[in-house]
Amino acid sequence: MKISIGNDHAGTDYKFAIVKHLEAKGYVVNNYGTDASDSVDYPDFVHPVALDVTNKKVDFGIIICGSGNGANMTANKHQEIRSALCWSKEIVVLARQHNDANILSIPARYTAVQQAIEMVDAFLETAFEGGRHQNRVNKIPVSC
Ligand SMILES: O=C(CO)[C@H](O)[C@H](O)COP(=O)(O)O
């Protein structure tokens, strides 16, 4: 499975921990995030992830900023993206089962590293349930 990941300065340490974890499990990870702690602008590091997911270059995306909000807002400007801002494993599981989320947004300043890793695992291992949820997901894009 291929993953693209992006982060701003608030998410650098979390990104390294997540990439290390995923690569140890055999995932291929494209790193679009900053590798430094110098202040940067999160959209510059999120759009490439959203484009990879949109263009089906990867299976899923992971984005990280301080609150998770800016990264999430940026990703969700892309028509094909369903990015979920999550703060617990339970929310992550629902984002996959009910919403078919294709990007996980992590709030680094409000999540422990180990919790973030557990959320990533849940995100990548949980299937979309389809059925009634498919009808709803189909209605998310704005067509007017
Ligand atoms: O969470 C974020 C966006 O939603 C950013 O990580 C946060 O705004 C960065 O703040 P600062 O420049 O004060 O480090």
Image: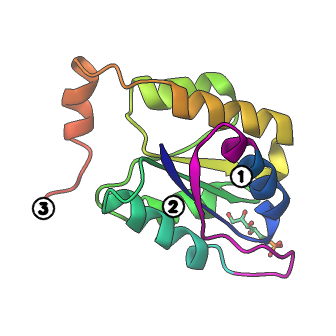
Instruction: Give percent across and percent down for residue 23.
Output: 68, 47
**Which quadrant holds the C terminus?**
bottom left
Whichever of labels 3 and 2 marks the residue nearer the N terminus, that label is 2
Residue appearing at x 72%, y 70% in the figure: 8
Above or below, comparing residue 58 to residue 128 in the picture? below
Instruction: Give percent across and percent down for residue 130.
Output: 27, 22
Instruction: Indicate yes or no: mark 2 CB to ligand 1 under 8 Å.
Output: yes
Q: Is mark 3 on a helix, strand or loop?
A: loop
What segment carries the magenta color? 21-40
Which of pointers 1 and 2 indicates the residue nearer the eye? 1
Secondary structure mostly seen in magenta is: loop
Disc ID at residue 73: 2
Residue placed most toward the observer, 23 or 71: 23
Whichever of labels 3 and 1 marks the residue nearer the N terminus, that label is 1
Q: Distance between the residues labelled 1 and 2?
A: 23 Å
Instruction: Give percent across and percent down for residue 5.
Output: 60, 59
Give the residue at mark 1.
19
